[in-house]
Amino acid sequence: QVQLEESGGGLVQAGGSLRLSCTASGRTFRMDAMGWFRQAPGKEREFVAAIMWSGAYYYADSVKGRFTISRDNAKNTVYLQMDSLKPEDTAVYYCAAGGRIDYAPSYASWGQGTQVTVGS
């Protein structure tokens, strides 16, 4: 079992930046893909970005060019740098580990979520 702990959410004005962090503990050898998903009120959880152990990365079209995912394998930590934030980025952001890129049901481990609110 992998435990995930997120940090870095908060309130920011449109155009601002935030960096989310997610640190994994436990049976981390099972991790390959680590991903970020988000869920806004009244909406389904959606894929944001994912990064493989190799460093290959993937982004949702809505965040390409604004968000950057990275990972430090030695620290079992994945980061999501969010720039040029928009009000529509407001959501609870979840870290996930051990799944297949953008397919949420394939991820076995999830963090508790961190709130990101972007003011207009």
Image: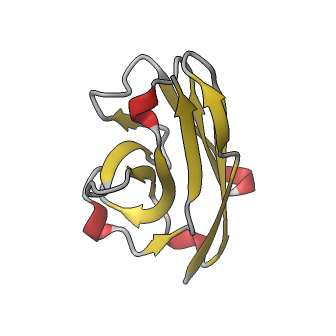
Could you say where residue 71 lies in the image, as x and y percent from the top left? 61, 43
Q: Is residue 115 above or below residue 16?
A: below
Q: Is residue 98 left or right of residue 75?
A: left
Farthest-out residue, right? 75
* Camera-nearest residue between 30 and 6: 6
Q: Which color mode does the image show?
A: secondary structure
The answer to whether residue 13 of the structure is visible from this angle is: yes
* Camera-nearest residue between 100 and 29: 100
Q: Residue at x 43, y 66 (%)?
A: 98
Quadrant in the rendering for residue 25: bottom right
Could you say where residue 28 lies in the image, as x and y percent from the top left? 59, 70
Q: Is residue 100 above or below residue 84?
A: below
State which quarter of the image contains the N terminus: bottom right
The answer to whether residue 101 of the structure is visible from this angle is: no
* Camera-nearest residue between 24 and 74: 24
Q: Is residue 2 left or right of residue 32?
A: right
Q: Is residue 21 left or right of residue 1?
A: right
Q: Residue at x 52, y 17 (%)?
A: 84
Could you say where residue 21 lies in the image, as x and y percent from the top left? 67, 48
Farthest-out residue, front? 120
Q: Residue at x 55, y 61 (%)?
A: 113
Could you say where residue 73 lies in the image, as x and y percent from the top left? 65, 51
How many numbered badges does the structure rendering display? 0
Q: Is residue 78 above or below residue 59?
A: below
Farthest-out residue, bottom? 1
Q: Residue at x 48, y 43 (%)?
A: 54
Quadrant in the rendering for residue 100: bottom left
